[in-house]
Image: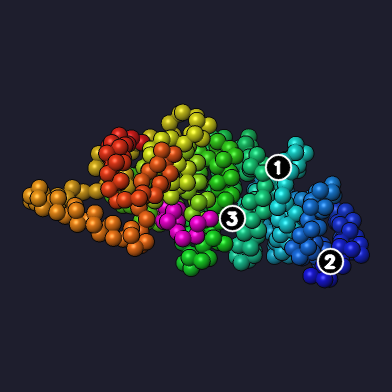
Amino acid sequence: MKVAKECCKNGILQSIINRMNMYKEPLFPLEIKFFDVKLIFIITALCPEIRKPLADDEYTVRYLIDILGNIVMKSYGDHHGKTATLNNEVVELASEILKALFNLTLRIQSSESELTKYTDLVSILRKCLLASVDAKDKRVTLHNNVINLLTNIPNPCYKALIPPIDADKTEDQLEYKSHDVAALSQILELLKTKMLNDGSVSDQHEILSPITTVLYKGACADRIIRKYLRSEILPPLKDVHSRPEEGSTLRNCLCRLLTTPMTQLRDIIAELLFVLCKKSVRRMIKYTGYGNAAGLFAQRGLLGGREDDGAADFSSDSEDSETEEYAEHKHMINPVLGCYEPPHADAMAEMSDEQKEFEAMKLVQLMDDLMKSGTIKPCRVGKDGKPEPIEHVLQLQESIKGQTNWRQDNCDSD
């Protein structure tokens, strides 16, 4: 820490930045570039107060972006858009540049010149995602650093991830609505890998938050990005007999995390799925089940069934053609579970009215005892669509009829 502060004061840091202007010389040693960028990363990590001055000057960030662009484009060479291969030394330098840029972009000003600069950066990051890397561990490190940096980038710049398809389309391009979405496909593959790797619950936030944040920002930034992500994460429903959280698809994995105790991760995943559903409460229930989405609805005041105000920001055209499987079983789908629920016998069918009343009063008494002991705190849906604590268990009766009617109105809706 002390050494880092001294580097800021005695001119070492400024000298390193000035030397970066010489990196364009073809014979400039790669080792010195790596050493310089590594020092910038360490100093900006240990001295937060130096980040803003460096980010605000007209050279530091621009130099780093240019260096990254030069080494990546040099690796592409004469491939004419085809996938290039980055050797280990280039990947190590690129990773240090990405880490230094991450520290310097934590607070970006969204001026027109800044957006232009960071749009250029996103174009380079896209090439980093698509390039081949000799060593698998280096590739994972590079991709993780790209994802981390993308979390800082303003939403409008994300469009550079999906450039228009070239006239002479190559095999490395993945076309979707006349745009190359190969980089998005790579990000989704990375998400699948992270999802399927077993890890502790406490590690979920660190592992998954950056990449889900990037997907959320991209979905908010551009209509084509959102529609492509929706087609991959929430395709038309065919498996209506399994719960949304059961299985190994991206939808299944994300729905499982809607109930994780890691609240920050849970919230960003809920927001991602909600945007992919065009902020439609009915669609969110259809794809995730009301039980999984209840946390999001409670935060947004949507428990009463009203639509989110943000739904008006999306076009009204339908992107969700109903499958034959869904249409066939729609009337038997339990909206709370989010799947088909087979008919089952009524447990109270053979009870007399007196028995039903006795069991109901016993349940009321048990709930009242739990409330008085502080074990549970029942709520009902308030006028603002958010949970509202009740004073007595009998107050639940007042809202049961309204909620039952709302469920009947929505069980047949998309």
Q: CA distance from mark 2 to mark 1?
A: 32 Å
The location of residue 69, given as percent across then percent down, is 75, 50
Local secondary structure at mark 1: helix
Which residue does the numbered mark 3 point to in the structure image? Answer: 210
Which residue does the numbered mark 2 point to in the structure image? Answer: 5
Q: CA distance from mark 3 to mark 1?
A: 19 Å
Amino acid at the residue labelled 3: Pro
Q: Which residues are magenta?
A: 252-264
Amino acid at the residue labelled 2: Lys
Q: Residue furthest top?
A: 316
- Residue 43 sits in quarter: bottom right
Residue drawn at 79 percent across, 52 percent down: 52
Quarter that holds the C terminus: top left
Label whose residue precedes the other's in the sequence (2 or 1): 2
Residue drawn at 29 percent across, 51 percent down: 393
Q: Nearer the viewer, residue 147 or 354?
A: 354
State which mark lies toward you, 2 or 3.
2
Amino acid at the residue labelled 1: Thr
- Residue 11 sits in quarter: bottom right
Predominant secondary structure, magenta span: helix
Residue drawn at 55 percent across, 36 percent down: 223
Q: Is 167 placed left or right of 355 in the picture?
A: right
Label whose residue precedes the other's in the sequence (2 or 3): 2
Q: Where is 175 relative to 130, above or below?
A: above
Which residue does the numbered mark 1 point to in the structure image? Answer: 119
Quarter that holds the N terminus: bottom right
Local secondary structure at mark 2: helix
Q: Nearer the viewer, residue 148 or 406?
A: 406
Please report contact status of discs 2 and 1: CB closer than 8 Å, yes or no. Answer: no
